[in-house]
Image (spheres, rainbow, N blue to C red):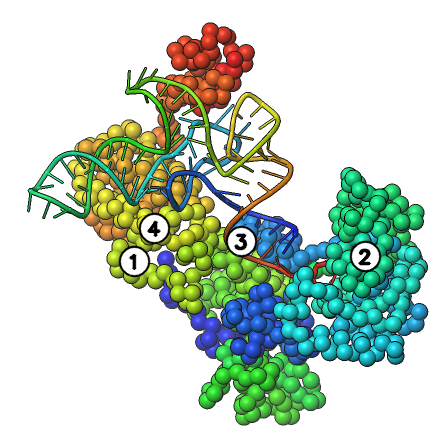
Amino acid sequence: MIDWDHEVQTIDPAYYKWTQWIFLKLFEAGLAEKKLAPVNWCPECKTVLANEQVIDGFCERHPDVQVHHRFLEQWFFTITKYTERLLENLQTVDWSESTKLMQTNWIGRSEGAELVFTPPSGEPIRVFTTRPDTVFGATWVVLAPEHPMVDQVTTAEYWGDVNEYRRQAAEMDLVSRRVGGREKTGVFTGSYARNPATDEAVPIWVADYVLMEYGTGAIMAVPAHDERDFEFATQFDLPIVQVVKPTDGEASTNGASVLPFASWDGVMMNSGQFDGVPCRKAVHAITDWLHEKQLGSRRVQYRLHDWCISRQRYWGPPIPIIYCDDCGTVPVPEHDLPVELPELQDFRPDESGTSPLARLEEWYRVQCPKCGKLGRRETDVSDTFLDSAWYYLRYPSTDYNDRAFDTELTERWLPVSQYIGGNEHAVLHLMYSRFVTMALHDLGLTKFEEPFTRFRAHGTIVKDGAKMSKSRGNVVVPDAYIAKWGADTFRMYLMFLGPYQEGGDFREEGIAGIRRFLDKVWVVVDSVDTSGGQSADPAITRKLHQTIRKLTQDMEELRYNTAIAALMEYLNVVRRSDIVPASVLEPLIVLLAPLAPHLAEQCWERLGHDGSVFDTSWPIYDETLAREEEIELVVQVNGRVRARLTVARDIAEREAIEQALQNEAVQKHLGGNTPRKTIYVPGRLVNLVG
RNA sequence: GCCCGGGUGGCGAAAUCGGUAUACGCAAGGGACUUAAAAUCCCUUGGGAGCAAUCCCAUGCGGGUUCGAAUCCCGCCCCGGGCACCA
């Protein structure tokens, strides 16, 4: 039941006051930083976006609009400080496996090593690799175009080439830059660095297939054992040295045709004292060896980046920060919250990279809360995902205006015991909420660190093979169906369509079946025997308890389709009976209530009850009453069904086999032979093997 | 390319632990009621052979393990989703 007294609206200053408060808490905890970084810019939204809001290089809200790179100073939440916990805690929560997997992949944990390649002069170049075992085959080094060391290593002779290449890379937008399989490009810097394993000088290149945002922004290239490096070697005629030979490969020694060989199933070669060692062992042996020489160390790398929360749009809670020439970055004092959104004539965003609020000088010019000198408000607002990252904490505490969430109420109601949503939020809302909750937990503000104990991802109902969207024009509007069939029918039909977590294509073919079922319920309720004198047929009672058991289990596991099928079966049994006592019908109505609430409520009233059906308790099944006394025992000969016997439920093995052997059809198929082997599965079958 | 999920009647789908494949519903066909139609009720319905009892075949394709496979293993094909030059 929905309690409208506990409604929240994230655009209400009474709500976003606390969103800003949460920002301040995270800021105090050192989890909010403003930094200059390459960020995703949507030219349609005219704002930056978080990585999680960029889908295949396109804007989440504008699927036709490509996202660009911009270097801007933005506020970030350092979610990466929680990477390990976000990963580890996944094992403690009861969530859909698909959702957990998506988060795991998004966090993208990789074990490997950081190795040092030393140029003759200047700083060493640090590279991250997951294959330190292949370091003997590293024949050059690549820096990302944005790598700060490019300037130092580029020689005068190559200065022009390198600069031109960097200029082109900077101009390229995210999409064309990141397409895998694109022809490799790059330039030589003129310098060399020493391979820490071979001690040989290898050339230093700059190429855009290396990304500054991942690892150290530099790699060692091992063309024999990495597809991309192999491609680059082919393109620029660079040396290829095989250092791993396949364990079970046929063409293991005469190399070229099987390269690049990127598998872990191999042993080392051309690797000095490590020759013959399997890759998986060599990884550690070589890393440790380089560690002793102080040229490398083990390292774990993640794909997850910090959460960019700055937005240059109007709608959103202004980030509660004031910049002062003397005091620097000053948080707005709690008692000054909320920082309200001012009225603005034209609130549309523009290309400037600053928020519409930056046009309103009388708003952003304020006194510094510390020294009183004239300062300037932050004009960016926060990501709307921050609003939703904590809303569940607000629900129980909406009556309190002096605190975001009340300790006692929070303890009583939270964490959320069952949450249902779509997998499109797996790496957005669900990840952000987990992070915010962990941060609040570490600040001592909540007792739990996971917001949602149990989460189930619903499937997507698609139409004509595609996700419903206004632009495609394939949206199913429920209103028409509700008008024609009724809300209960439509609701129940959607549940009956198929497994809840799978979704499927929307068709209306079967909807009449649900309506017929509900009509039959109504008719049966009308014909119920209310005299109280009739006792129920034992067969119906048995079916009733089986149905209660099935519903109890199915509802808990969100298996609505089979729950409904079970109710239909039960109704079919009830309808075959001439007399229907209230005792067999009332539980049906209670079981139906969560599926067809309106109809159930009316039936309940019609059965002579004053209160709501939702105030009655869920029926409890009796295992003894649900038990079948007689069962059908299948008799197989050599695994094929040849007879079915009706026997007592608890028939002894010896007796069952005895009866099976006496069966005529069974004897025929045995052909007069005695079975060599008999298999007995209690309550199910006898298999005679001849 | 890598990682998940799925493929079962004409259709949506069941079979939850390796043990009666096709529950439940839709659609279709036949019948009852009706002057007629709708609605409702009853019956039939995986494919094939047969008067029948019954038998054979069938869970995307090809192999395997097992007394027994939709379910487990190996190799493919197709559909949906996620990630993607992440070193």
- Element type at marker 2? loop
Residue A251: which quarter of the image?
top right
Q: From the image, tell me which residue sits under label 3.
A: A453
- Residue sitting at 36 percent across and 31 percent down? A626
- Element type at marker 4? helix
Q: Would residue A1 be seen by someone viewing this image from the given angle? A: yes
Q: Chain of mark 1?
A: A
Give a yes or no on whether discs 4 and 2 share a subunit. yes
Q: Residue A370 versus residue B54: which sits nearer the camera? A: B54
Give a yes or no on whether discs 2 and 3 share a subunit. yes
**Label 4: how many residues lie within 10 Å, few (<14), some (14-19) or many (20+)?**
many
Residue type at tag 1 = Tyr
Instruction: From the viewer's perspective, tell me whether residue B64 is left or right of residue A509.
Output: right
- Residue sitting at 54 percent across and 14 percent down? A677
Q: From the image, tell me which residue sits under label 2.
A: A222
A22 above or below A296? below
A291 above or below A274? below
Discs 3, 4 touching: Cβ within 8 Å: no
Q: CA distance from mark 1 to mark 3?
A: 35 Å
Q: From the image, tell me which residue sits under label 4.
A: A493
Q: Chain of mark 3?
A: A
Q: Residue A21 versus residue A222: which sits nearer the camera? A: A222
Q: Single out the mark in the foreground, 4 or 2.
A: 2
Residue type at tag 2 = Val
- Residue sitting at 49 percent across and 54 percent down? A457
Percent position of residue A94, x then y: 55, 49
Q: Chain of mark 4?
A: A
Point out the tag, 1 or 3, that comes first from the N-terminus.
3
A623 above or below A494? above
Q: From the image, tell me which residue sits under label 1.
A: A481
Q: CA distance from mark 2 to mark 3?
A: 44 Å
Percent position of residue A475, x then y: 38, 62
